[in-house]
Image (spheres, coloured by chain):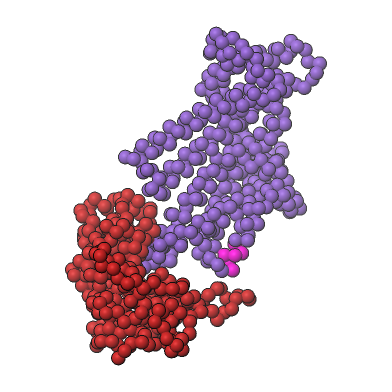
């Protein structure tokens, strides 16, 4: 069973201490960035992780990457527990999990050429030591990322490229290691709308060609609609609904998902959906509301919601949501 | 290709700036009040003929430039005078021959006076600069690496205190301490040792240099350290550092390959500006330790109204600041590929 999954996350928690420990700080305050996340990912599967800013999407991906240490829970990657991997193991795992960051203007070192940027991972991991082989891999990664012909880009610097091209360079430098899992943390949110579709198509192609599993983090359900297999909706550090793309988009169960979906613009101007506008601010992640963490903003909350915190319940084999109002 | 054009442009600008300084330098001293001929000898009984003889000797009888006999007080003159027979052109012509004029006070050529002082200054301030750069950058990197720990905070406080210490005060304190512990109290060499063997003399100069160099290093180290620390912390917070970490680079590799090169940019600017002023000398340090450097020469020349020496010293400082800036620009274009392509 376990071999089917490339990644299994169990009860993952990541808490940050609020304020530094000291004489005047209260040591027992924590930001609950990721709070009991359960997630399974099959080989070659694309899952979209959706939620508003500050819901813990990025912390989750940094924790999966090993850039943040998990507070509790386990992460199994290809059947192996990597939650508290040693630096040496971590380095080896990094060949197989790579990440694409949000801002292509910030995530490239301005003093390196594209060739240096893309070949650096090979260099660091001591792969492809033969110069010909290395050039070949760098070229392939660039061309697979849509920078053709690669020769035109090798000796340029990041500031000479457009935003879309830069993001392709970021993707190429993740691909050059031939990872099995790609974490894409809002890879298109900083790009022009016209470029977004290209980058998403590129990721879809790569998954076809190389059978890479992708965790695609976004705050925009609209951009992932036709790319991801499954969607997980996060709210305040927890997954509140998870299911296949079709199920979640057509038949959302959690009121939060419904609200998110209702505000996606519809191309047909005559067709007007009733928008659900959530009231109030996201609660402080240090001081979580009792009961269901969504109840202060929930348009359909009942008394019971203030008291008990609902777990994920199955709606169908592939679809579950965490809401007390789910009619079984 | 664009790198060469950038280089040529920068050099052309530097040459233009130096030329501008040459002209400014000339007029700056001509508009100052006071008769240079009288500044040297302050004897009211001096005869008119003697004053006139001094004026002729230093070429002060000639018009400053066409149409102006003198600039302070403004005195109009003949516009049709031969331009090559004006003070301005004689000044330019002498400069092209490397003549800066003759000191009013010592009657020696200014270039001789300045050159001798220049070497002393470069010896002292150069050593201080190199030490403070090395120590400051090393401490700054270390503090940034250990950011927000006790080591970092102690380094930060030390740096701030060092930077804000008044130079002359620190110098005097060290001088007091040194004079009780067998250090020479001033000057560059012990008098009467000029016939001793070379090694002995070198050791003697080294002993004289220790305290002023230490003062300079302490004061300037703080600046380098603080700037290096904050610049490195800025760079370490960049996304490409996180990306590098995700690629699998170790902390040392990240520092070496990604962080330092980008964090060096502000330091290069400060080093260049400070190097330019190296030639000007740290006037306070040279005064406290009676070091016969350029800073001291300027200090004395101001007191004696020795305009040719001042004029020469100003030119020297201006040129070295311009050259230091040129070097900074070129280093920048090497460190940061964004600089030379617009």
- Write the residue at 69% across / 31% down: B302
Q: Is residue B212 something that shows in the picture?
A: yes
- Chain letter matching colour purple: B
Viewer-proximal residue among A19 and B64 = A19
Q: Quadrant of the C terminus of chain B?
A: top left
Of all residues shown, which one is farthest toward the right? B45
Q: Is residue A16 visible?
A: no
For residue B8, above or below residue A273:
above
| Magenta stretch encompasses residue B85 | no
Q: Colour of chain A?
A: red
Q: With respect to residue B241, does B271 lie above or below?
A: above
Left/right of residue B130 with respect to residue A163 in the rendered view: right
Q: Nearer the viewer, residue B280 or B210?
A: B280
Point 28% across, 87% down: residue? A315
Q: Which image quarter: residue B55?
A: top right
Is A172 placed left or right of B324 in the picture? left
Q: Which picture quadrant has residue B262? A: bottom left
Marks counted in the figure total 0
From the top left corner, tell me how far across and down residue B260 is, in percent: 45, 57
| Segment tinted magenta in the rendering | B150-155
Q: Quadrant of the N terminus of chain B?
A: top left
Corner quadrant of residue A319? bottom left
């Amino acid at each position: 069973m376990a071999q089917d999954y490339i990644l299994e996350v169990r009860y993952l928690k990541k808490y940050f201490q609020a304020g530094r420990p000291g004489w005047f700080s209260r040591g027992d305050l924590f930001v609950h960035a990721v709070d009991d996340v359960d997630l399974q990912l099959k080989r070659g599967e694309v899952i979209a992780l959706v939620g508003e800013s500050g819901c813990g999407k990025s912390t989750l991906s940094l924790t999966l990457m090993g850039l943040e240490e998990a507070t509790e829970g386990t992460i199994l990657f290809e059947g192996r527990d990597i939650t508290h991997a040693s630096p040496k193991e971590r380095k080896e795992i990094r060949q197989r999990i790579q990440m694409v960051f949000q801002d292509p203007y910030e995530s490239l070192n301005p003093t390196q050429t594209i060739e240096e940027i893309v070949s650096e991972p090979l260099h660091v991991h001591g792969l492809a030591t033969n110069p010909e082989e290395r050039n070949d891999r760098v070229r392939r990664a660039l061309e697979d990322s849509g920078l053709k012909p690669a020769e035109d880009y090798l000796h340029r610097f990041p500031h000479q490229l457009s935003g879309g091209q830069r993001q392709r360079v970021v993707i190429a430098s993740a691909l050059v290691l031939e990872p099995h899992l790609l974490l894409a943390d809002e890879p298109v949110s900083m790009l022009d709308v016209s470029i977004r579709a290209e980058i998403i198509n590129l990721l879809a192609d790569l998954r076809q060609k190389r059978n890479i599993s992708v965790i695609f983090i976004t705050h925009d359900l609209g951009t992932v609609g036709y790319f991801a297999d499954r969607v997980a909706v996060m709210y305040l550090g927890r997954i509140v609904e998870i299911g296949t793309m079709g199920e979640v988009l057509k038949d959302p169960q959690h009121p939060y998902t419904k609200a998110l979906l209702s505000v996606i613009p519809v191309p047909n101007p005559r067709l007007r959906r009733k928008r659900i506008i959530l009231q109030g601010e996201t609660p402080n992640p240090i001081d979580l509301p009792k009961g269901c963490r969504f109840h202060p903003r929930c348009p359909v909350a009942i008394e019971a919601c203030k008291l008990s915190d609902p777990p994920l319940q199955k709606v169908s084999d592939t679809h579950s949501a965490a809401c007390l109002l789910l009619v079984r | 290709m664009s790198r060469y054009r950038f280089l040529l442009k920068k050099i052309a600008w530097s040459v233009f700036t130096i030329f501008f300084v040459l002209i400014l330098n000339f007029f700056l001293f001509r508009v100052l009040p006071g008769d240079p001929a009288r500044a040297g000898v302050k004897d009211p009984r001096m005869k008119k003929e003697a004053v006139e003889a001094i004026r002729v000797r230093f070429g002060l009888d000639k018009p400053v430039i066409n149409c102006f006999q003198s600039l302070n007080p403004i005195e109009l003159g003949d516009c049709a005078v031969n331009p090559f027979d004006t003070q301005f052109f004689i000044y330019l012509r002498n400069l092209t021959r490397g003549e800066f004029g003759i000191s009013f006070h010592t009657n020696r050529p200014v270039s001789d006076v300045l050159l001798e002082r220049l070497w002393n200054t470069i010896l002292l301030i150069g050593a201080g600069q190199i030490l403070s750069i090395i120590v400051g950058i090393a401490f700054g990197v270390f503090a940034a690496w250990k950011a927000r720990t006790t080591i970092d905070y102690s380094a930060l406080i030390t740096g701030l205190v060092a930077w804000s210490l008044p130079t002359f005060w620190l110098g005097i304190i060290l001088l007091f301490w040194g004079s009780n512990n067998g250090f020479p109290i001033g000057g560059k060499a012990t008098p009467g040792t000029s016939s001793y063997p070379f090694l002995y003399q070198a050791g003697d100069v080294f002993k004289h240099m220790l305290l002023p160099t230490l003062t300079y290093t302490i004061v300037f180290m703080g600046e380098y350290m603080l700037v290096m620390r904050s610049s490195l912390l800025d760079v370490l917070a960049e996304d490409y550092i996180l990306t590098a970490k995700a690629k699998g680079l170790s902390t040392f590799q990240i520092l070496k390959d990604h962080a330092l090169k980008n964090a060096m940019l502000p330091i290069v600017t400060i080093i260049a500006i400070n190097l330019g002023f190296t030639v000007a000398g740290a006037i306070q340090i040279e005064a406290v330790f009676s070091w016969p450097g350029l800073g001291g020469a300027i200090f004395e020349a101001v007191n004696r109204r020795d305009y040719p020496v001042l004029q020469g010293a100003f030119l020297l400082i201006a040129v070295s600041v311009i050259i230091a800036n040129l070097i900074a620009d070129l280093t920048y274009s090497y460190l940061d590929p964004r600089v030379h392509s617009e």
